[in-house]
Image: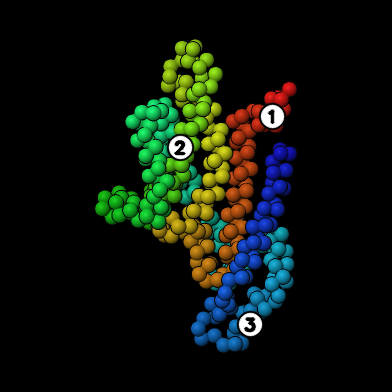
Amino acid sequence: MNVIWRRLLAALPVVWGVSTLVFFALHMLPGDPAAVIAGERATAANLEAIRQQYHLDQPVMVQYGRFMADLARGDLRISIAAGMPVSRLIADRYLATLWLALAGLAFSILFALPLGVLAARFRGTWIDRMLLGVSLLGVSLPTFWVGPVLILLFAVHLGLLPMGGFDSSASVILPAVTLGLALAAGLSRIVRVSMLDVLSADFVRTARAKGLAERAVIWTHALRAALLPVISVLGLQFGVLLGGAIITEKVFAWPGIGTLLINGILQRDFPVVQGVIIVISTTYVLVNVLTDIAYGAADPRIRSGGKGGGG
């Protein structure tokens, strides 16, 4: 438990750094948010009133101090465009994005594990070369191309799945495949390399010498050891999925925080953009802490800090 708290405390400077970077980056952008809110027919008095309401008339460092003070209290401020608390806007959409990212991650794992294991099992054969080609193709295809193609094929021509939105559980299939395809392809290569290392290890040779079936050796003994680097990659990539969901959400009209972020950028809604990025980065940090815990559960040497290995 102490390790978890230490990891969480160590992550606080990261969240602070991201928040600071986002704040100043947004304030360096050209344009006046008050003019965007007030519209084309706004008077000078209207603009000044909006600037005072959102403290846009104060020096940047004063605004930064107020922003950090609000953030320390867990207050993500009020959306300039919607006039609602940013925390409420994010809460309404966060689960949709989390659900999409988890579905994309699940697709990646289900796709990558059998491909990586089979490629390692039949190393150097036509099966290995074919699977490597499939993984290379998956990595090469951009998300903004895969999404529309899947919509045309499975929604428009075949009519098997919804075209977009979040109306049913089937709605997540096409966005999840689009989001997770590149990760699945890359992950299958990592599984293959890890399996090749494990299959030449002494404990695998011992298992084979005991007469265990090859299927049991691979899927029971070797795969568990080969999953250690995969777990580490999954933790890092989950944050990438959250960030990468922005394009996928736009393609499939998915009501997540990615769409909220894009609208916030277009409307120069500083509080919304800051809030979404902070929530994504905080989620990324928490997932990495959970990854460390899972890593320790999978390998007792890591859980004990490796004290038993050096004598």
Residue type beneath disc 3: Ala
Q: Give the residue pinned by disc 2.
A: 189
Q: Give the residue pinned by disc 1.
A: 306
Q: Nearer the viewer, mark 1 or mark 2?
A: 2
Q: Nearer the viewer, mark 3 or mark 2?
A: 2
Q: Position of residue 6 (x, y in %)?
A: 72, 43
Mark pair 1, 2: CA separation? 28 Å
Q: Residues within 10 Å of mark 3 (few under 14, many from 20)?
A: some
Mark pair 3, 2: CA separation? 57 Å
Front one among 190 and 94 = 190
Residue at figure coordinates x 67%, y 31% from the top left: 303
Residue type beneath disc 1: Gly
Q: Position of residue 154 (x, y in %)?
A: 30, 50
195 relative to 161, above or below: above
Residue type beneath disc 2: Arg
Left or right: residue 311 versus residue 290 is right
Whether pointer 3 and pointer 2 mark residues with C-beta atoms closer than 8 Å, the reply is no
Q: Give the residue pinned by disc 3.
A: 49
> Where, quadrant-wise, is the N terminus in this rendering?
top right
Residue at figure coordinates x 61%, y 66% from the top left: 25
Residue at figure coordinates x 61%, y 87% from the top left: 45
Toward which corner of the image does residue 24 lie, by quadrant?
bottom right
Q: Position of residue 222 (x, y in %)?
A: 50, 25
Q: Earlier in the sequence, mark 3 or mark 1?
A: 3
**Does residue 165 show up?**
no
**Does residue 148 show up?**
yes
Element type at marker 2? Answer: helix
Q: Residues within 10 Å of mark 2 (few under 14, many from 20)?
A: many
